[in-house]
Amino acid sequence: MEYRDYQLDIIDRGVRILSAHRFLYLAMEVRTGKTLTAMGIADKVGAAMVLFITKKKAMSSIEKDYNMLKPSFNMYVVNYESLHKCADEWKWDLIVLDEAHSIGAFPKPNKRAKAVRDIVIRCNPRVILLSGTPTPESYSQMYHQVSFIPRNPFSGYKNFYRFADDYVKVVTKKINSLTINDYSNGSDRILEMMKPYTISYTQKEAGFESTIEERVLHVSMKQSTYDMCKRLKRDLVIEGKEEVILGDTPVKLMMKLHQMYSGTIKFESGKSMTLDRSKAEFIRDYFAGSKIGIFYKFKEELEVLKEVYGDALTTELSIFEDTDKIIALQIVSGREGISLKQAEFLVYYNIDFSATSYWQSRDRMTTMSRLDNKVFWVFSKGGIEDKIYKAVTKKKDYTVRHFKRDLLDL
């Protein structure tokens, strides 16, 4: 295996930064080789025991890269949810945090950030953070990504709130009868402070010339699906013999309609049910003979796809890569850290409310040599998906505020 010229340059620069500050942020866009570059840096600084923390779906791919590279260090790959399995007696001298923005929740740290912090405090390792989008929604997301690292530029602040005093324009908002502080308006000075520790690299700088072509396909759902949606909008409740569909708040109504227009429902009891297989059957027929990657949103949608595709469907990346099977991935868990370059097309069974999900997941097929990526969105005619698509393509999350405005058109 040979590194590309730009990767060799980043490895040299990364070694200098990591040696000087004991931490490094590689802000490299998807498909530019963050994983292998991080391993090259770990090898060159003489790391012995490396802990590579990532998302579950990406673990097999990272292990494959490690076996291909054959570096001098020992490496253990674990997902964020399984950090407790790392035995306390293991002394890590370097930790790699893949998709580091996932530990950037604020104002309070999330479970992932706390779990990583505990290991860093115990082992005092060097740290490499990886992300193509370090602050996808707010510059404030940077604080908890680095707060547990001793030499981080914000180490003088006791907690996020004191950090916010200097770096965040706090806005007071009223939600229902509650008054809350919105800490999302972080200053661009946050990124300025991180510059000495960060190496950024884009697909364009790497020589990528690929384009993403999107097409929306509309499916007529069963009349019973439209009738149920109409009834829920009118009555805000549908009561069956054993189950209840409740849309008595704007948030619940938005979620239930989002499910129902795509053919599934989660009842108040917590149980789920398939209402309409029209979307899954359309995808099967329209893309017959093609090796595709399918993104779905709700868990019950996977069950619909399994019913329609049977053994031709997998949810495991390694099986997708080694066989003719198609793959189905949940949007949020599959939007980062994996490559679907074997797919001829990406097909969305449904769409997520998050703009981050839109921009990250649609780029899963991109490689340097692939010039054309085709992405298909399968929406129900007259459903809510077109409204969500309009928002996220403009880099805006689809919120209850959007839904209330759009409700009259549904």
Image (cartoon, rainbow, N blue to C red):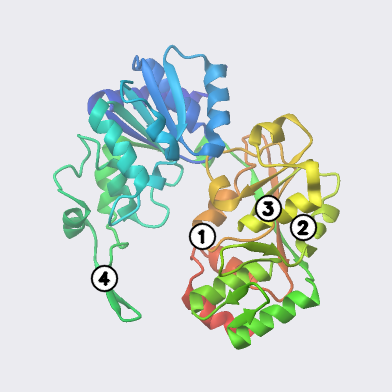
Three-letter code, disc 4: Val
Amino acid, disc 3: Leu
Task: Give the Cα distance between marks 1 and 4.
Answer: 22 Å
Do we see residue 336 in this rendering? Answer: yes
Query: Viewer-nearest of labels 1 and 2?
Result: 2
Residue at the spot 74% in from the left edge and 49% down from the top edge: 306
Of pointers 1 and 4, the one earlier in the residue sequence: 4
- Pick whichever, 141 or 236, lies toward us: 236
**Pointer 1: what residue?**
355
What is the three-letter code of the residue carrying label 2?
Ala
Q: Earlier in the sequence, mark 4 or mark 2?
A: 4
Q: Give the numbered dot on residue 302.
A: 3
N-term mark: 3 or 2: 2
Mark 4 or mark 3: whose residue is earlier in sequence: 4
Residue lying farthest top? Answer: 72
Q: Nearer the viewer, mark 4 or mark 3?
A: 3
User: Contact (CB < 8 A) between labels 1 and 3?
Assistant: no
Where does the image place residue 17, in percent across and percent down from the top left? 29, 28
Instruction: Please tell me which residue lies in front, 233 or 34.
Output: 233
Q: Disc 1 vs disc 2: Cβ atoms closer than 8 Å? A: no
Can you identify the residue that label 4 sits on? 171
- Image height check: is 8 above or below 147? above
Q: CA distance from mark 4 to mark 3?
A: 40 Å
At 56% from the left and 56% from the top, the residue drawn is 358
Kindly state the secondary structure of the residue where label 2 is placed: helix
